[in-house]
Image (cartoon, helix red, strand yellow):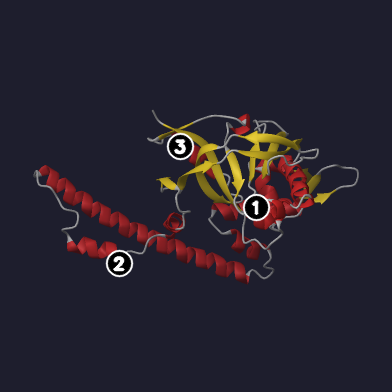
Amino acid sequence: MLETMTISEVSKIFSVSARMIRYYEKLGLIESSRQEDYAYRVYDKSAIYRLQLILILRKLRIPLKQIECILNDPDQMRTLQILRENVRDINEEVAALKTIRSIIDMFIAHLDEGITKNIRFDLLEDQNLIDMAKTLILPKVNLKEVFSVSNLVSGEKIIDKRMDIRIVYLPPSIVASSHYIGENPEDEAGKQLEDFIKNVNLPGIKPDFRVYGFNNPCPQEGQTHYGYEFWVTIPEGFAVPEPLFRKEFSGGVYAAHCIKMGDFHEWRSFFEQMQNNPEYDIEWREPNGMGGSLEEHINAFSVYREEEESFLQLDLLIPIKKKL
């Protein structure tokens, strides 16, 4: 392995997106450096080792907050405690899932017997099964769904509770666009956008501004550089200085799925759910970088006001239309 690697090299070797690597760096989990007479930031052996460890621990479902503790635990006592706590949680999930399976198996047996004898079975007639179900502790893997569905914004329609997919309407708007193609396009385009927002005091002028982003063009296999474009909504007639430029966004109806920054792997399952949705079709439209799909920074106002943020939330947005 090389002494140092660029973010593109690291991304290719470990099959992790450059955006995810930058997110880990933003959290302080890894560090990069800039070599003299070299334009791009690089990662040394220590950073690469830490990234490998992060990726393994994430596959083991260790939360990032706990990973931070593990990476900064010289005597490994806290690491031992964290792993024991996770084993305990997994054991609780396994026990809960076994109970769920047992109850479902019993329901299946009753239904199978009833169908064979041509007798309709009432699922609520077996009091023992009902008592078991009432006392059941749900496995923690389901808690995200329970939380997200109970905290939905009023007026949004839920079309798939498995992934917390909602239907939202984005109004037409004028946007300032920041676009960059090359190494670290999200960072470069994002810096241009941030400078614009702060220089014109957009939070003070338009406190309801929204920030969207999308790959443009999308990265292709074997491709070193790709592009990323940010949009921020601005008032009608507002001057847009270079290197940004003015665009019109037509808005429309979108399927929305909320994630924490970094969980971009959910794009794949989100697309699969919408491709198989019985009520809506995906409607490919402009901007064509991602077929009209967008990423909206939900708490952009707080971030660009430099207020304290617990984590950055994104809405993944896929343009849709009602099936005929």
**Image point 46% across, 54% down: which residue?**
152
**Image point 49% across, 44% down: which residue?**
168
Task: Report the front residue among 143 and 278.
Answer: 278
**Real-space Cα distance between discs 2 and 3?**
35 Å
Q: Taking 288 as reference, is 257 above or below it?
A: below
- The dot on residue 300 is 1
Apparent side of residue 146 relative to residue 210 in the rendered image (left or right): left
**CB under 8 Å between callouts 2 and 3?**
no
Residue 117 location in percent, x, y?
8, 45
**CB under 8 Å between callouts 3 and 1?**
no
Q: Secondary structure at mark 3?
A: helix
Which amino acid lies under the numbered mark 2 shown in the image of this protein? Thr
Residue named by callout 2: 135
N-terminal of the pair, mark 3 or mark 1, is: 3
Q: Secondary structure at mark 2?
A: loop
Residue named by callout 3: 274
Which amino acid lies under the numbered mark 1 shown in the image of this protein? Ala
Label 1 crowd bin: few (<14), some (14–19), many (20+), radius 10 Å: many
N-terminal of the pair, mark 1 or mark 2, is: 2
Task: Report the front residue among 28 and 286.
Answer: 286
Residue 2 in view, yes or no: no
N-terminal of the pair, mark 2 or mark 3, is: 2
**Image point 86% across, 47% down: which residue?**
35
Which amino acid lies under the numbered mark 3 shown in the image of this protein? Met
**Which label sits in the foreground, 1 or 2?**
1
**Real-space Cα distance between discs 1 and 2?**
42 Å
Which quarter of the rendering shows the C terminus?
A: top left
Task: Report the front residue among 52 and 42.
Answer: 42
Residue 150 location in percent, x, y?
43, 58
Q: Taking 290 as reference, is 11 above or below it?
A: below
